[in-house]
Amino acid sequence: MVYGLGDHMLNHLSHALHTFPVFALVGFKEKGIRPLAIEDLVEVLQGALVKGRLTKKSVALTGAEELHLSEAVRRVARVTGHNIHFMPAPVSFHYVLARLWELTMKVPLVARTQVRILSEGVVEPALPCDPLPWDLVPIRRFTDDQIRKGLPRPGPFTLSDLRCCA
């Protein structure tokens, strides 16, 4: 879950906060996420591609801080000045919504693959991997300042976000 200016996470989340007063949580038991700042990703990519520091290595890259999606949404809501209400909903409900958004939106609010990720959590790598060198380990937490740097212009979703109005 990479975040930063122009990303899908903060972009869609901030527009959703301007559009909807209720946020449905994926499933009845939240899983952890580790949002990754784009700056941390860039440092690892530079280390790998420019400096050759990760040759023949497979690494897992996740953010510096583990939190639940609801906490991430609360932080973005606080920074954007919104009050948000949560309601837990079954994963199957989110798959239906995701399919609807995939069919109707140019860039879906949430895609089915994202529902799967959120329902399973994204904290640990699925397979064993090589450790990152200590100086490439992500350090940026999902703070108000980091969120502010990545937010788009405020506003709700509009008709231009729909496929039929492209």
Image (cartoon, rainbow, N blue to C red):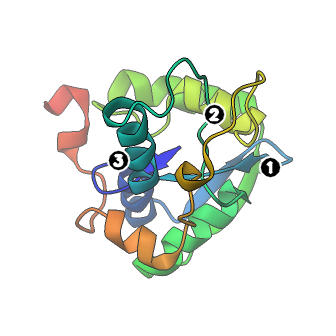
Q: Secondary structure at mark 2?
A: loop
Count neighbours of disc 1 (C-alpha within 10 A) and say few if under 14, some if 14 to 19, many if 20 or more.
some
What residue is shown with label 3? 7
On the image, the x and y values in percent for residue 143 come to 53, 74
Q: Where residue 30 is drawn, which disc sits there? A: 1
Image quarter of the C terminus: top left
Q: Looking at the image, do the residues carrying marks 3 and 1 touch, with CB atoms under 8 Å apart?
A: no
**Discs 2/1, front:** 2
Upstream in the sequence, badge 3 or badge 1? 3
Q: Say whether residue 8 is left or right of residue 61.
A: left
Compare residues 127 and 70 and report the one nearer the observer: 127
Residue 9 in the image: above or below residue 129:
below
Give the spatial CA distance, label 2 vs label 1.
22 Å
Q: Say whether residue 90 is left or right of residue 110.
A: right
Residue 51 in the image: above or below residue 3:
above
The quarter holding residue 91 reads top right
Compare residues 48 and 64 and report the one nearer the observer: 48
Count neighbours of disc 2 (C-alpha within 10 A) and say few if under 14, some if 14 to 19, many if 20 or more.
some
Q: Say whether residue 83 is left or right of residue 30.
A: left
At a point 74% along the width and 35% down the height, the residue shown is 119
Q: Where residue 153 is drawn, which disc sits there? A: none
Q: Amino acid at mark 2?
A: Ala
Q: Secondary structure at mark 1?
A: loop
Give the spatial CA distance, label 3 vs label 2.
20 Å
At a point 73% along the width and 31% down the height, the residue shown is 125
On the image, the x and y values in percent for residue 113 come to 57, 24
Residue 34 visible from this viewpoint: yes
What residue is shown with label 2? 60
Q: Amino acid at mark 1?
A: Glu
Compare residues 32 and 39 and report the one nearer the observer: 39
